[in-house]
Every structure is written in C-alpha cells, then in structure tokens.
Amino acid sequence: MPTKKKRKKSKFEKRRIARGAGARFELKVRNELESEGWIVDKWSNNVNLEGKKLVKVKNKFLGPGKPMMLGAGFPDFIVFKLARNKGKNYKIIGVEARSDGKLKKDEKEKCRFLLDKKIFSNILVAKKGKKRGKIEYIDFKKKYNNL
C-alpha cells in the first residue's frame, strides 16, 4: 500500500496555526488567573516609545465578514486583586502571554516605561511550563533587573 506524501504547509497556513495557538494560550492564561481570584481585563493601551506616552490602541478592520481585531495592547492583560498590605488597596499587575517567554527589545523598553511611570506595580510574562499544560510566570523585574 503506497504511503501518503505529506504536503508542505504554506507560510499563510503556518501563520494561521501560530496565531490560533497564541490566542488559545492567552485564553488559558486568563482562565488560570481568574481561577486564582484575580480580576482580569484585556489591556487596550500601548506605549509610544518615540513620544514616551501611553496611547489607545485602535481596532483593526480585517475585511467584510471577518471579526475586528480587538485589543492589541501591550501587555495583554491588566490583573488586580485586593492587597492585604497596609497602605495599598489593590495590587495591579500587567501580564504578557508569550508561549516561549521571550520579549523583544522594544517590548522590554515598554515594560520599563510602564514600571517607571508606576502604571503597573509589576509585570509578569506567562510562558508554557516544562510539564504539559502548566503555565510559568516570569517576573520582569527579577529577570531584567537592569531598571
């Protein structure tokens, strides 16, 4: 019996598969944070590095019959919960979901800006854990301590 020859995937198919995997990972991170008692919302702002200011992200029109791309802000989520410390009411954290846990150079600069301006008290990078289905969180301040 002849074996089936595997068809090579096009760049379009690879991008579509990767985008879907990223969206599923973001949803998994969001569900885990909510199950731990955090209040989670999509962050719809971004940092303009040239002007050194926070800007609102515009929704993108993908064409007729296709849903709009919403909330392409950085970081992906703003999460908060009631803090148990005296003097602070809420602990507000930014969470960026990256399956490999690596940030690009401009994203590191954006994180530094957000922490310097005290918009977030902390920024976490969520990445896939070594065990299947587990999520690890990297503290931005600890990994990139050259703030």
Image (cartoon, grey):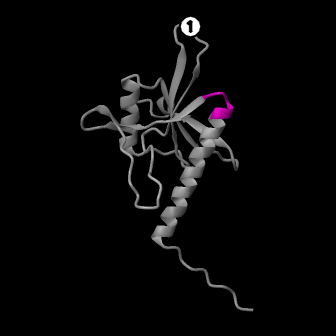
Q: Which residues are magenta?
A: 34-38
Q: Hey, which residue is sitting farthest top in the picture?
A: 86
Relative placement, left or right, of 58 versus 19 is left
**Is residue 26 a member of the stretch shown in magenta?**
no
Residue 102 location in percent, x, y? 48, 45
Which residue does the numbered mark 1 point to in the structure image? 86
- Residue type indicated by callout 1: Lys
Q: Is residue 126 positioned above or below 86 on the image?
A: below
Using a 10 Å C-alpha cutoff, classify the residue at mark 1 as few (fewer than 14 neighbours), some (14 to 19) or many (20 or more).
Answer: few
The residue at the point 64 percent across, 45 percent down is 129
Relative placement, left or right, of 75 versus 17 is left
The residue at the point 59 percent across, 29 percent down is 39
Quarter of the rendering containing residue 40: top right
Q: Is residue 124 positioned above or below 63 on the image?
A: above
Q: Find numbered disc 1 in the image and state the secondary structure of the residue it sits on.
A: loop
Q: Quadrant of the C terminus?
A: top left
The residue at the point 52 percent across, 46 percent down is 98
Relative placement, left or right, of 147 versus 126 is left
Residue 81 location in percent, x, y? 59, 22
Q: Hey, which residue is sitting farthest left in the picture?
A: 51
Residue 34 location in percent, x, y? 64, 33
Residue 92 location in percent, x, y? 51, 24
The residue at the point 37 percent across, 41 percent down is 57
Q: Quadrant of the N terminus?
A: bottom right
